[in-house]
Every structure is written in structure tokens, then in C-alpha cells.
Amino acid sequence: MTDISPLDQARILSEALPHMQQYDEETIVIKYGGHAMGDEETAKNFARDIVLLEQTAINPVVVHGGGPQIATMLKRLGIVSEFAAGLRITDAATIEIVEMVLAGSVNKQIVGYINEAGGKAVGLSGKDGNMVKASKTTRTIIDPDSHIEKAVDLGFVGDPEKVDLTLLNQLIGYELIPVLAPLATSREGQTLNVNADTFAGAVAGALKAKRLLLLTDVPGVLDKSKKLIPQLSVKDARKLIADGTISGGMIPKVETCIYALEQGVEGVVIIDGKMQHAVLLELFTNQGTGTLIHK
């Protein structure tokens, strides 16, 4: 880090003031996952940034994924996953490991880093306090031989149906930082694994969050010439999906943003989680960093 003069440091802090006022006492949901979780140093920097938000009277809620960690553990235990239409089928043996990794090791590691940085993090999953109820996800694929559409049972995978805020309301605004693993319960009491982006969208919507930040592996939404698009309305986003500008893995991300906005979030930002201090850059500087999607 280059040495910044005390005067420059003071100027930087001063410039952050209007941004801090904009988010004062507001709830910000941050989805943290994939390669954004990266190495230990990246994770510790992220934790410091979250504690800083809490210190400036913002209420951060962290939702994390853990795909790479789940894959590593399944491999270590010799559990082979079946795939259908590119999606992992989560059987009974797999969901046990998913829960162990997400609600156990990954969740408590993030909690540990936040607490080490001076925060008070509380690690939970969507099962706690009946926070998130989900229904089993069904997907259909076209059979390549018969060309008939078939339903695929993805096993213990769910889509959020209902979010109960009783527990979160006991924590938010009391200097406690909720760290949520994307697991939910079905009506029958089964544990279901929920896509972390979708889970974050549902929770942020229920909380009527000011912002949902999706930390990803990309800088944001890019136009045809691969330049970052700083802002998009839902209408623009749908157009870009229709004309193929938004394609591949970015489609479900943007659809999650639209879903979160429909649920009641004010704005959703897709940002590059690998960038140092991405969260602070987005919230506290004039330039922002990723793509903001709004109504």
C-alpha cells in the first residue's frame, strides 16, 4: 500500500460522509461466495470491511455459498455426484455433506474472521428459527432421443417460498452481524440446499434491504464490446438477455437481481468480489464499482 498523507486520509474519510448518510441505519445484504471467498487474506479483508459497515451504523447481513468447498469434501469422502442438465443431483448422502460444509466449516470460518476483526457475527442457516421455508426445485429437460420434455428430480434442492424475519429482527440493529448459510426446510421438515444468490435475494427482499450486493467472479454486466455497464433498469436488463448481450452464467445472476427487486430490495449490485475492498468501493465512493440494477 502506498503511504497516504494524513491530510489525504482525512479527505477520503470526509468524502465518504454523504454515502454513509445515505445508508445510515439501512440493511445491506451481501452475498459472498465462489472465488470471492478466495484465500485467507481476501477473506480477512472482507471481514474487516463488514465490521467497518457495522461501525458506521449500517446493518450488514452476510449470505455465503460454498460450492468449491462442498466439491472438495465430497471428493475427500469419495461421494460421486450424478448430474442432470448440468445440475448436481443432491441425494441423501450429499445433502448431509452440504449441510456439514455450509452450516459448519464455511459458516463458522466467516464468523471467526468477522469476530477476529472486532465484530460480533452470529452464524445461522435458513433452518434456524424457521427463517426460510423452501419447496423442492423441479427442472425440466428435453430428452435428446425422444425430444420429450421430462421433469428432473434434483433431490434435496429447494427454491425459497417464505421468509420469517422473527430471528433476524432480534439481531439486526443490535450490533450483531448475521452470517447465513443457504439451507432451508421443506414443509415436510427436510433440509434443502438453496442456490446462495436466490437465498440472498429472498432474504434481502423480506428485509426490504436498501442494497443487495452480489460478490461474483466478474466485474459486473458487460456490454457487447465487453465494457462495464454501470447501471441498468429491469427493463434494460430484460432487453439485454433477449438480444444475447447477457448470456451464460450471467443470466441466472441477473434474474436473481430482478427477483430481489420484485421482492422489495431497492437496488442490487453485481460486483467483482476478488477486488480488494469491493464492498467499501461500492458503498462509500462516488464511482461505485459494479453494475447497479434497479426498478
Image (tube, helix red, strand yellow):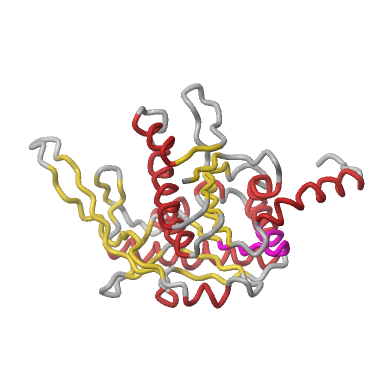
Residue 24 point in image, percent of width and height: 67, 61
Residue under the image location 67 percent in, 51 percent down: 41
Residue 170 position in % (x across, y down):
55, 78
Q: How many marks?
A: 0
Tell me, yes or no, if residue 247 can be seen here. no
Indicate whether residue 55 is drawn in magenta: yes
Residue ID at (81%, 46%): 12
Question: What is the x, y in percent for residue 242?
Answer: 34, 32
Does residue 271 show up magenta in the picture? no
Relative image position of residue 6 (x, y in whole percent):
91, 47
Left or right of 273: which side holds 245?
left
Quadrant showing the N terminus: top right
Q: Is residue 164 above or below residue 156?
A: below
Q: Which is more toward the observer, 84 or 57?
A: 57
Q: Relative to 169, is 200 above or below?
A: above
Quadrant housing residue 131: bottom left
Give the residue at x 50% y 58%. Answer: 64
The stretch in magenta equals 50-61
- Residue at the far top in the pictured view: 225
Is residue 95 in view? Answer: yes
* Of 215 and 143, the residue lying toward us: 215
